[in-house]
């Protein structure tokens, strides 16, 4: 899929979301939410493809940067990618399958994973979506520094396996050299590791370990096909960790600030508990029209009806049993019937 294909899909999905904005029917609300999230994912993929294909990714120094990574890995005593590739080269079938795995399964598996997460574990979806968005954006920024993949260093001993077996998506020079010089970091590895970690963490099925196997296999495939160094994957995983830290830390900070704001204007004796918070344990805004429940700091139950607009609400019960609610869109506390 090219970035142009992804752009067309994003436009179609965006129009679908816009046309159904005012509808409150259950199935339309669900379809609209799915279309919105799918548009985000395809936009990320399109940005990746577009950035790789543009001349803004300068070719100057790319080969030298690739050699520098190779030498740094030797200083750090990382395993030799050349040695691993030589173990596989005598087996053409394995090499061909590796080429196909690298070129064809990366994006479909990620899409299937996100659909599964949306349908089966929607409370976890927003953090994962934000993590993948931040990590991919960070990878694109780093890729503005051109780095040649190992297959462009034949003097070291690397073999371009896809070119050897006529499976290259680039050819000898590709669609211009720039699209081949975004080896650092590896988005293939970043997305595969995210899939593996999340599926193992949230699923209870014994089949969840296949996702972990996908992550490991992707790391091996990108090295065996000489498309990435070990370092490319290491940096990608580090950026993935950064993405997760920001995806969870920023909302947590925002919730803390909202809680202080709510507490500052709360009636005397009322201690607010946060419910309906985006990314919180009680309610996630990605799940529209869901009733959220939480336990307030004073031990009483608190509840709030959420909306598709992901509004933050604070609720608690005072000592006399009356319920107090503070919505961020209305900066005041109101008392409800007990």
Image (cartoon, rainbow, N blue to C red):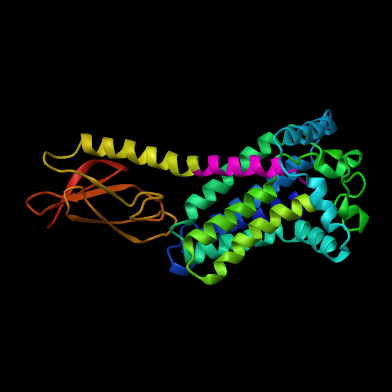
Side (left or right) of 77 relative to 181: left
As drawn, 331 above or below 165: above
Q: Residue at point 82% right, 42% down?
A: 150
Magenta-colored span = 226-244
Rendering quarter of residue 36: bottom right
Q: Main secondary structure of the magenta part?
A: helix
Side (left or right) of 268 relative to 73: left
Residue 26 pos. (x, y %):
44, 68
Rendering quarter of residue 146: top right
Residue 54 pos. (x, y %):
79, 38
Residue 14 visible somewhere in the drawing:
no
Residue 312 visible somewhere in the drawing:
yes
Q: Residue at point 85% right, 33% down?
A: 63
Side (left or right) of 149 relative to 127: right
As drawn, 7 above or below 55: below
Seen from the viewer's position, the closer of residues 271 and 88 is 88
């Amino acid at each position: 899929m090219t970035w142009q294909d992804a752009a067309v899909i994003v436009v179609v999905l965006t129009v679908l979301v816009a046309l159904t904005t005012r509808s409150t029917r259950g199935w339309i609300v669900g379809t609209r939410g799915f279309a919105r999230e799918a548009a985000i994912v395809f936009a990320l993929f399109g940005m990746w493809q577009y950035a790789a294909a543009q001349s803004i990714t300068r070719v100057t120094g790319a080969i030298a940067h690739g050699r520098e990574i190779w030498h740094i890995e030797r200083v750090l005593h990382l395993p030799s990618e050349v040695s691993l590739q030589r173990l596989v080269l005598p087996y053409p079938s394995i090499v061909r399958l590796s080429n196909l795995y690298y070129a064809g399964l990366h994006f479909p598996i990620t899409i299937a994973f996100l659909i599964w997460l949306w349908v089966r574990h929607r409370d976890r979806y927003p953090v994962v979506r934000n993590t993948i968005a931040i990590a991919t954006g960070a990878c694109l920024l780093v890729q503005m520094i051109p780095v040649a993949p190992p297959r462009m260093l034949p003097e070291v001993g690397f073999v371009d396996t896809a070119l050897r077996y006529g499976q290259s998506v680039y050819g000898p020079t590709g669609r211009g050299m720039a699209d081949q010089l975004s080896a650092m970091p590896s988005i293939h590895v970043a997305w595969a590791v995210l899939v593996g970690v999340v599926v193992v963490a949230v699923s209870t099925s014994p089949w969840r370990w296949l996702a972990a196997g996908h992550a490991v296999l992707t790391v091996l495939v990108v090295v065996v096909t000489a498309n990435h160094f070990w370092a490319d994957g290491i940096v990608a995983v580090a950026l993935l960790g950064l993405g997760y830290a920001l995806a969870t830390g920023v909302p947590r900070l925002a919730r803390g600030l909202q809680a202080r704001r709510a507490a500052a204007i709360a009636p005397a004796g009322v201690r607010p508990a946060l419910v309906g918070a985006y990314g919180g344990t009680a309610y996630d805004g990605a799940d529209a029209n869901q009733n959220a429940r939480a336990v307030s700091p004073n031990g009483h139950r608190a509840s709030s009806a959420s909306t598709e607009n992901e509004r933050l609400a604070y609720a608690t019960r005072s000592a006399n049993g009356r319920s107090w609610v503070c919505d961020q869109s209305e900066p005041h506390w109101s008392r409800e019937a007990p």
